[in-house]
Amino acid sequence: MGQGTADRVAPTPLVATSRQRRLISADRLFRAIAYSAAALIMVIAVIFVIALFIPALPAITKFGLGFFVSRNWDPVRIEFGALPAIYGTLVTSAIALVIAFPIGMGAALFLAEEARLRFLRGPLSFAIELLAGIPSVVIGLWAFFILTPLMRDNVDPFLNHTLGFLPFFQGTASGYGFLTAGVVLAIMVLPIMIALSRDVIRAVPQALREASLALGATNAETIWSVVLPYARVGITGAVLLSLGRALGETIAVTMVIGNRPEISGSLFSAGYTLPSVIANEFTEAVGNVYLGALFYLGLVLVVITVVVNVLARLLTWRFSGSEPTVA
Amino acid sequence: MKRALIALFGVATALAACGGNTGATNPSTGGSSIPTPPAASLTGAGATFPQPFYAAAFFAYNKRFSQVTVNYQAVGSGAGIQQLTKKTVDFGASDVPLKSSEADAMGGSDKVVQLAGTLGTESLAYNLQGVSDGQLKLTPETIAAIFLGKVKKWNDPALKGDNANVSLPDQDIRVVHRSDGSGTTYIFTDYLSSVSPDWSSKVGKGKSVSWPVGQGASGNAAVATTIKQTPGAIGYVELAYVLQTSMAQARLKNKDGNFVLPSAAGATAAAKEFASASPSQFSIVNAPGKDSAPISGYSWLMLYKDQADKTKGTATVDLFYWLVTDGQQYAGNLHYAKLPANMVSYDIAVLKDVMSGGATLLNVPS
């Protein structure tokens, strides 16, 4: 925009009027502000990583890369490893996406494409916004008091009964563990996933839909072979933003995951996530190595988030051949 | 939160009983020896465990001496120690006295004064259908075996032996522990380490440990609630939470062989047994004595021996003098235990070491 004004001003008279001079200097000022704002973001990001790295150093020098493969989390002997927390973070986020993706797509398609039952759109959109606005600690409270007994007495035994031949659904359930945390995360990422996917699907040009229908395709065929492929990049972005939220969610997960640094194939088992360990232990973490290990976990979380984002961007570039517009 | 409310009620009742007499001397509490502090605004930070008691007591102190306001931030012992090290607070509080490395960061252990501010005890709460409050009896050996994961079922012979008249179900034992670092965990694992060599060598003691079994919940309240809503659960919870939420708690076998229901009086009885308790020998778990509650512990206050600001320093030692003497009356309502006489005299003795410009700040008849 600043550039545009300058272009328009430049070719007119050789001697600039005072108004034009004012416009040019306003333009320069605007550019300076924009550049420094952009630079500030870079500086904040760099400072942030350095601020994590320096306090993490005692743990990095002591444990090195072994931190990523060690299963130990023993504050008494000052031996720390991140693997159980990394595992828990990835597993709970994966469960959340597996549950939220089909529901989210269904709801988004209903909101964007379905012509009948239009009167439901308003209430449904309102419900989604309501869900998005609930603070995570409140969702955690609900999960702690209502969801965990429900999972223990109904959902987990049912899964064990019907799908018990899979290793994921074996063992006795206490209600606290990966699966419950995954369900809570699914509830928390649904609003983002639905709202973004709905907007992306709505942005598919109407002409494409009409062309498809004119060729004799049914509504379902149009959605499947025209709308969804066109919206794929945007939907990937929506899933990624959801994943970002799931990876970093702390309080609600801490309340239901059981907080146990252990790797277990059974989704009924108690586990731990990176943010939960940090939130639980930093207040009483005494000593440079212990505190350093928590900062190291923070670094690992940042790295995971960055890797996920980079992978996703590469994926969307491959599929679309251009830069993603969403995310 | 609940405790804080109860604390306020307790204070309100106590004040009502005083008939609004908030003068400098208060005959009803024998307060003539309590020094009148200079005007000051004090800030402290540290442990969460004593917070409800400190909040109630400091509130009452401010009612009596309105020129002194105390702001106590329950940010956790570790954070409290760090803030005192950086001198951003006037005093710190921790459930475990300073380690030598922490004292060194403050300039050496001879630069810091540590005194016991209050005393608490822990219960083992459980959720077993048909087994009511106080019915279950636990020995130190079975407690260690349960938390080591060796006893897995409620009808294990190890449990049946002491509970012949209780019908124990064929149910999994679900161990619940604290997931956040806490003094409560330190005292409990200190207890397990002292009664079980196996625990001592495999796990050890600390504010956070590597638990052999079970699941974690953050804070006393969450541990209590998790136990309440999980059939077959057992966990260690601060006494106050057990009493306020009317959970079932076990009778614990103490060193003298008596099965006692943990209580504030039991904690004081246990503390009395350790006449030479001090910051360097602070452990009072598994105490002898017939009434002793076995899982008890002090909570500590700390301040610099040399106070740069004489006014603030005087206000702090005056406050602490009151806290360990008259202030102890606010402990009972909140299920904290009163400090035993030996610890009160220890506290007063170390408060007299606090100086400013070479002069002792505490001015009380000895």
Image: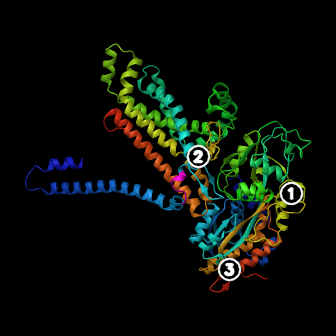
Residue A181 lies, in percent from the top left, at 59, 39
Q: Is residue A19 above or below residue A159?
A: below
- Measured Cα–Cα span from mark 2 to mark 3: 47 Å
Residue pointed to by mark 2: A84
| Secondary structure of residue under mark 1 | loop
Residue pointed to by mark 3: B354
| Same-chain check, marks 2 and 3 | no
The type of residue carrying mark 3 is Val
State the image quarter where residue B313 is shown: bottom right
The type of residue carrying mark 1 is Asn
- Measured Cα–Cα span from mark 2 to mark 1: 37 Å
User: Which is more foreground, mark 2 or mark 3?
Assistant: 2
Furthest toward the bottom, the residue is: B358
**Magenta residues?**
A62-67
| Secondary structure of residue under mark 3 | loop
Residue pointed to by mark 1: B254
